[in-house]
Amino acid sequence: MQTSADFLVRLVTETITELREALREAIPRLVVAIIFVSVAYVAIKVVLAILRRFLRGIYPAEQDLIAQLWVAIVSVFCWFGAALVLLNILGLGAIAASLGTATGFLALGVSYALSEMIEDAVAGVYLLRDPDFNPGDR
């Protein structure tokens, strides 16, 4: 007959063995994930620096806010993509797919809600570019 002490010792031994095996399987993924995060960090910083330099040549200094907006948008997309790839590396591909799908639906809803405002903004840009109209005309 098995005593409670023997049962407890066997349970602890099995748990430690399972933990050791799980860590042995997880360590390569964690190393790859750390390397990926390091490479992604450097790559995203380089992409954003190149984008800033490119936008500085396109937009004059008084339109710096537009350039900052573009850099922020590209930064969010890059980091979100890196996060999805990281989840996939860690073996959480189903969660990454769900997040990607949910984000797509969210973006679709936001774009539909903002469609009229975007139309008005584009029409305003066309009016500003039209030589027949000047700011302040009535």
Image: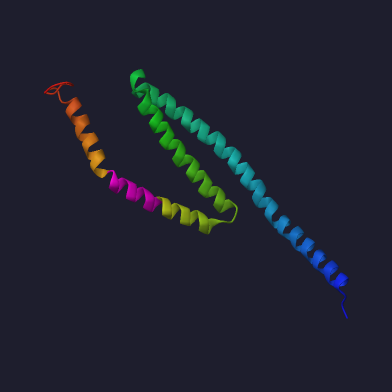
Q: Is residue 55 left or right of residue 46?
A: left
Rendered-image quadrant of the C terminus: top left
Name the residue rendered at 75%, 63% in the picture: 18
Q: Is residue 15 left or right of residue 50?
A: right
Q: Is residue 98 visible?
A: yes
Residue found at the very far front of the displayed protein: 4
Q: Is residue 60 visible?
A: no
Bounds of the magenta segment = 104-114
Tell whether position 44 is magenta. no
Quarter assignment of residue 115:
top left
Q: Position of residue 14 (x, y in %)?
A: 79, 66
Q: Position of residue 60 (x, y in %)?
A: 34, 19
Quarter assignment of residue 131:
top left
Quarter assignment of residue 20:
bottom right
Front-most of 3 and 73? 3
Front-most of 105 and 85? 105
Q: Position of residue 97 (x, y in %)?
A: 48, 56
| Main secondary-structure element of the magenta-colored stretch | helix
Q: Is residue 10 above or below residue 41?
A: below
Name the residue rendered at 43%, 34% in the picture: 72
Residue found at the very far bottom of the displayed protein: 1
Name the residue rendered at 23%, 35% in the picture: 122
